[in-house]
Image (cartoon, grey):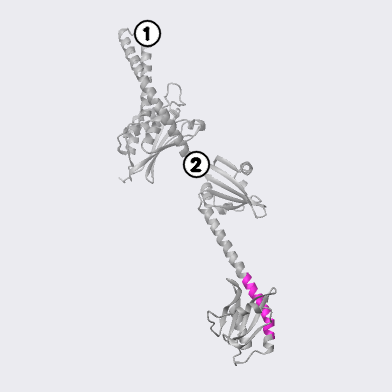
């Protein structure tokens, strides 16, 4: 625009030298040239006199000042915001009075145009700054790993970040403009708004913390609601695992002491009962009583040995173990029992051979406990499915049955020593406790998912020594 102004003035007045002066943005006490045509102005040129002459219709310099003779102020809102500087005509003559009257008339319009241009640039700069700030804020929201939902005063969704897309499986384009109550239960949203924070909520198969806060403008008027969803499923699982480890450690120390104290009297009872049986006839009524005593001491001894295995902390010798081989050998031990119980065994084992570092005997004990529990849970027959896969540097083994399942209350207790849902005499309640300890000893993890009536799925994660090799 400044170039057009200079060009038109030069052609209308037949002048070769023209300059537009504007206030210095860094120093409002002086005017500086911003558009120059037909001349060169030194950097040290002094135009400070312009600031003290704003009340004059124009300034005339008979002696050329840097080849300029006329300085016409440009006003906007009763304030001089710039000057038009002009030299003589192309013939070397001064401007006529008509030329100067025209300039005085035009200068006000030029001032308005300059002011509008300044305002436009200012508005454009603010818009750019606003867009940059908006982009920056959106980048922050998109990069955080918690779900962010924003709804307006009508309860319609206007914000939905990538983390929330992952948590819900819904694209933001599917949610914009919809009511939050269409995605979350209305009663839940009401409770969240009233309480502001809801902790450890079961939602969408996850455990999450929810927070809600009102979005207000500078006048304190509510413009919407911000809802934060923090997926803490893994954190809760780790906390539960830590609590379980601490609990098992404490119980293990207690169990070790009890086992050693009980073993001695058990050995004495077993020895004397067997000696007495040899001294009396099988027809003697006391013979059967002694048999029961002997049998029960053996059972008690087995429980004590399991306690010792559970609490044993001595180092175990590790070697490379083929997980598939351990699974296959363990299944062969129970093959006849599965057939008798009408249980179909399905294997979905990798074509590769996953190798872990461990003790084959102890790992077999883990799988034996899981397979036996699955068998007992399918009294009317069913299907046992064993699946393996490698994920990153781990091998995952999933043992899934179609049995009776485990209630939510009991799932929290299944690794506790002596906890069992089996009938009296059918189990000691130590199998999963021992298995848990063995898996931890191998640097792995064991988790369970179950629903009553739909079966149970145990997942073992064990570190790989080396990547599987196709055979």
Using the image as rendered, state which of residue 298 and residue 57 is in the foreground.
57
| Segment tinted magenta in the rendering | 101-119
* Viewer-side label of 1, 2: 2
Residue 419 position within the rendered picture, expressed as x and y whole percent measured from the top left: 45, 27
Main SS, magenta region, reads: helix
- Quarter holding the N terminus is bottom right
Residue at the image position 38 percent from the left and 11 percent from the top? 289
Relative height, residue 371 to residue 100 (above, below): above
Magenta span has 113? Answer: yes
Q: Residue at horizontal 39%, vertical 32%?
A: 435
Return the x and y of residue 284 as percentages of the image width and height. Answer: 35, 6
Can you tell which mark lies on residue 286?
Answer: 1
What quarter of the picture does the C terminus occupy?
top left
Front-lying residue, 387 or 269 = 269
Question: Which residue is at the front of the view, 271 or 278?
Answer: 271
Q: Secondary structure at mark 2?
A: helix
Q: Earlier in the sequence, mark 1 or mark 2?
A: 2
- C-alpha distance separating marks 1 and 2: 59 Å
Left or right: 191 with respect to 341? right
Q: Position of residue 320 (x, y in %)?
A: 30, 39
Residue 90, placed above or below residue 114 = below
Instruction: Say what secondary structure mark 1 lies in.
Output: helix
Residue placed most toward the observer, 464 or 374: 464
Residue 175, position as x, y percentages in the image: 58, 51
Q: Which mark is residue 62?
A: none
Residue indicated by mark 2: 233
Crowd class of label 2 (few under 14; some 14 to 19; many from 20; radius 10 Å): some
> Is residue 371 visible in this depiction of the protein?
no
Counting every numbered tag in the picture gives 2
CB atoms of marks 1 and 2 within 8 Å: no
Residue 294 visible in the snapshot: yes
């Amino acid at each position: 625009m400044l170039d057009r102004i200079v060009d038109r003035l030069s052609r209308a007045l037949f002048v070769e030298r023209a300059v537009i002066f504007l206030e210095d943005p860094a120093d409002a006490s002086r005017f500086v040239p911003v558009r120059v045509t037909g001349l060169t102005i030194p950097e040290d040129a002094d135009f400070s006199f312009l600031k003290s002459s704003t009340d004059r219709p124009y300034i005339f310099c008979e002696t050329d000042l840097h080849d300029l003779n006329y300085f016409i102020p440009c006003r906007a809102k009763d304030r001089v915001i710039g000057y038009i500087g002009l030299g003589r005509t192309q013939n070397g003559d001064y401007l006529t009075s008509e030329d100067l009257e025209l300039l005085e008339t035009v200068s006000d319009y030029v001032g308005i145009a300059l002011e509008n241009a300044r305002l436009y640039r200012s508005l454009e700069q603010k818009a750019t700054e606003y867009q940059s700030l908006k982009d920056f804020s959106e980048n922050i929201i998109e990069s955080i790993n918690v779900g962010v939902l924003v709804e307006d005063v009508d309860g319609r969704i206007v914000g939905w970040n990538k983390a929330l897309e992952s948590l819900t499986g819904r694209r933001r384009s599917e949610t914009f403009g919809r009511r939050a109550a269409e995605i979350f239960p209305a009663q839940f949203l009401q409770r969240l708004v009233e309480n502001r924070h809801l902790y450890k909520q079961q939602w969408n198969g996850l455990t999450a913390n929810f927070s809600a806060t009102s979005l207000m403008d500078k006048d304190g008027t509510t413009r919407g609601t911000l809802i934060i969803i923090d997926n803490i499923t893994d954190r809760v699982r780790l906390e539960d695992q830590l609590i379980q480890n601490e609990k098992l450690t404490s119980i293990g120390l207690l169990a070790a002491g009890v086992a050693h104290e009980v073993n001695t009297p058990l050995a004495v009872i077993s020895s004397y009962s067997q000696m007495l049986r040899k001294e009396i006839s099988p027809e003697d009524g006391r013979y059967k009583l002694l048999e029961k005593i002997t049998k029960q001491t053996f059972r008690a001894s087995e429980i004590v040995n399991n306690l010792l295995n559970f609490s044993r902390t001595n180092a175990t010798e590790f070697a490379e173990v083929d997980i598939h081989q351990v699974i296959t050998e363990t299944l062969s031990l129970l093959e006849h029992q599965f057939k008798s119980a009408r249980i179909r065994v399905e294997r979905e084992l990798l074509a590769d051979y996953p190798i872990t570092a461990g003790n084959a005997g102890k790992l077999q004990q883990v799988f034996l406990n899981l397979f036996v529990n699955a068998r007992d849970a399918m009294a009317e027959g069913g299907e046992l499915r064993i699946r393996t896969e490698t994920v990153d540097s781990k091998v995952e083994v999933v043992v899934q049955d179609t049995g009776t399942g485990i209630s939510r209350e009991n799932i929290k207790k299944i690794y506790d020593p002596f906890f069992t849902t089996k009938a009296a005499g059918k189990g000691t309640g130590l199998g999963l406790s021992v298995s848990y300890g063995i898996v931890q000893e191998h640097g792995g993890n064991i988790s369970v998912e179950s629903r009553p009536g739909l079966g149970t799925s145990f997942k073992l994660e064990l570190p790989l020594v080396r990547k599987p090799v196709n055979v």
